[in-house]
Image (spheres, helix red, strand yellow):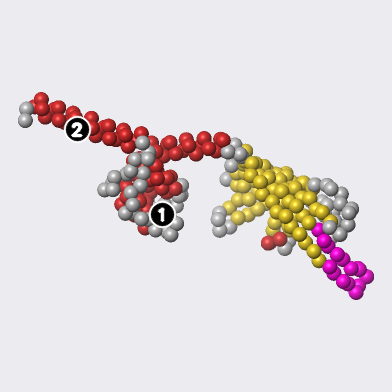
Amino acid sequence: MSKKTLVSAITAALVVGAASTTFAAANPFSDVPADSWAYDTVTTLATDGVIDGYPDGTYQGQNTMTRYEMAQIVARAMAKTDLEKADKALVDKLAAEFAEELDNLSVRVADLEKKSDNVKWGGELRYRYYDIDRDSSLGDETHNKVLFRLEPKAYIGNSGWTANARLDYEMNLSTDENDNNVEVDRAYVEGPLFGATVTAGRTPIFTAQGMLFDDHISGGTIAFGSDQFTTTLAAGRYNQNHDGND
């Protein structure tokens, strides 16, 4: 084989190899080759508990995946913060291999977040009835009411802060003397600040499983600490008569 033929063959091989790589990167739905090292790496991460794999908790390594599917697995692994050093190195290696797909995935998620509604609604409909007959001077008591509660939560950009509210409407089914008023039971913001979680406004307070305090104050709270031990400080004004004189 002449030098010219050899150079032509090497050039052709490099062009084909470059075209294949470009195609794989440009088409995230192309399959990762069955003999790729990525499968063994993902299997190791699944064994170490870094990724969950399929719904039954196993990773079916005999099935090929697209580069997009592999990037999704890598993205979930990258979200873990307590990785062992060896697992972290494997995740970094996968991230380098599927960098373009991960980048495209991030852009796609960001675009969806911009288009989605940043307000979430929760709530409940509660019916409560009781009839108490007393022999004491306190007299009998009948409670027959429906409570309709809405709890909107608005996400403030990507700051981690939320605006929260709770609106209550109570209807007495025993009488026609409903005042038709909606009570704004809570209205506060919550978010991270200097490593702590802060709330401000008409904010809820719940201590000792509600045994000491289960109500709202006009003020704020600061919660800080670890997952095992958290300290919460609260300060504000409390109107003990807003729900009666008890």
- Which residue in the structure is indicated by mark 2? 13
The C terminus is located in which quarter? bottom right
Which amino acid is tagged 2? Ala
Q: Where is residue 74 in the image (x, y as percent from the top left)?
A: 40, 46
Seen in the image, is 44 located left or right of residue 116? left
| Residue for point 37% across, 56% down | 59
| Residue for point 29% across, 45% down | 33
Is residue 181 covered in magenta? Answer: no
Are circles 2 and 1 on residues that touch, CB within 8 Å? no
Seen in the image, is 220 located left or right of residue 242? left
Distance CA(mark 2)–CA(mark 1): 37 Å
> Which residues are drawn in magenta?
131-145
| Residue for point 56% across, 58% down | 228
Q: Position of residue 25 (x, y in %)?
A: 34, 36
Seen in the image, is 132 located left or right of residue 196? right
In the current view of this chain or complex, which residue is farthest to the top?
4
- Which residue in the structure is indicated by mark 1? 53
The N terminus is located in which quarter? top left
Secondary-structure class at tag 2: helix
Which amino acid is tagged 1? Gly
Secondary-structure class at tag 1: loop
In the current view of this chain or complex, which residue is farthest to the bottom?
135
Do we see residue 70 in this rendering? yes
Seen in the image, is 62 located left or right of residue 156? left
Q: Position of residue 150 (x, y in %)?
A: 71, 48
Q: Where is residue 126 in the image (x, y as percent from the top left)?
A: 74, 57
Q: Nearer the viewer, residue 116 or 90?
A: 116
* Mark 2 Cα shell of 10 Å, populated few (<14), some (14-19), many (≥20): few
Is residue 136 covered in magenta? Answer: yes
Q: Could you tell which of marks 2 and 1 lies nearer the N-terminus? A: 2
| Residue for point 38% across, 36% down | 100
Judge whether 37 appears above or below 7 on screen: below
